[in-house]
Image (cartoon, rainbow, N blue to C red):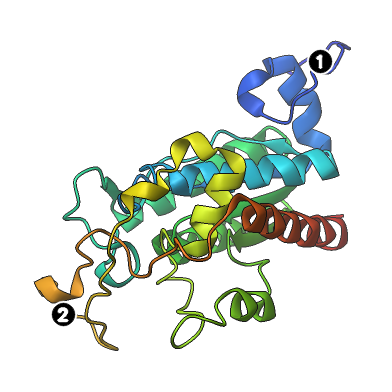
Amino acid sequence: MGMAIYPIEMVDTVKAEEMTWYEFSDRVREDVVFLPVGATEQHGPHLPLGVDVVLPSRLCERIAAETGGLVLPPIPYGGRSQTESGGGPSFPGTIDLRGSNLLNQVKDIIAEVVDDGARRIFVMSGHFENNSFVREAIDQFLIESDEEVQFVFATTFTFIPDSFKEEVFEDFPGGYPGDNKEHAGVFETAMMLHFDPSLVAMDKIGDVEAPRSTAYRVKPAPEDTIPETGLFIDPSTAASAELGERVVTRIVDSAVEVVESELQ
């Protein structure tokens, strides 16, 4: 039995949680659907636990506003924090999911919105350790489903050009340390200063001593490989709200181009 959808005036929002089911039903069939996937994880002494939720959510909202998209509520928990990219699970406030649980949650959400009519989905991860599980969730859905659905998967760092990363880090020894070591670093701090400076306490950073880094992994992690404050680098010399605005603009402009070229 088909469900009658009554004509209504659309709400002026891209956020699904602010829509009625009537509004959502009309939008999900036509719009690109955005799913932010985050984490609840330590981000040093100066940033809140929810950075990996705030950043992909705000970015998806900006991209959706430019493209007429719809943003689902974010997944607030992520894959298990690793010592070399997030400090590891020993920090209070870092709340992890098993990889299989995250994979199944992403796949279930995708299946639900596809059942509602979604055919174009953009997934953005704000947490380094999520990435392989999110990609696997998309792959499994595509293998198991008969529906024709297009996906784009990206991270909060995907659309920051390498040349821009090197430019910002030209005065840092060794240059750009990599997306994993940038955890709670310059770009995340700058974007948070741009989006909500009330959540950033730059005066709390203090001295930062980089932990020992290895090309291999030891489990349990030796204490000298765990960053004492949760930071791998000192963001205070380069992070600013102005840089954050520049970074966000680059990400949004590039992502809009991808949506318009890949999800049509």
Name the kind of residue labelled 2 in the image.
Val
Q: In this view, does 198 lie to the left or right of 85?
A: right
Q: Is residue 26 above or below residue 93?
A: above
Secondary structure of residue under mark 1: loop
- Label 2 CA crowd tier, 10 Å (few <14, some 14–19, many 20+): few
Secondary structure of residue under mark 2: loop
Mark 2–mark 1 distance (CA, rounded to whole Å): 56 Å
Residue 155 in view here: yes
Q: Which label number is shown at residue 63?
A: none
Residue 125 in view here: no
Labels 2 and 1 touching (C-beta < 8 A): no
Say which residue label 2 marks: 218
Q: Which of marks 2 and 1 is nearer the N terminus?
A: 1
Q: In which quarter of the image is the N terminus?
A: top right
- Label 1 CA crowd tier, 10 Å (few <14, some 14–19, many 20+): few
Which residue: 26% across, 63% down? 87
Say which residue label 1 marks: 5
Which residue: 60% across, 41% down? 195
Name the kind of residue labelled 1 in the image.
Ile
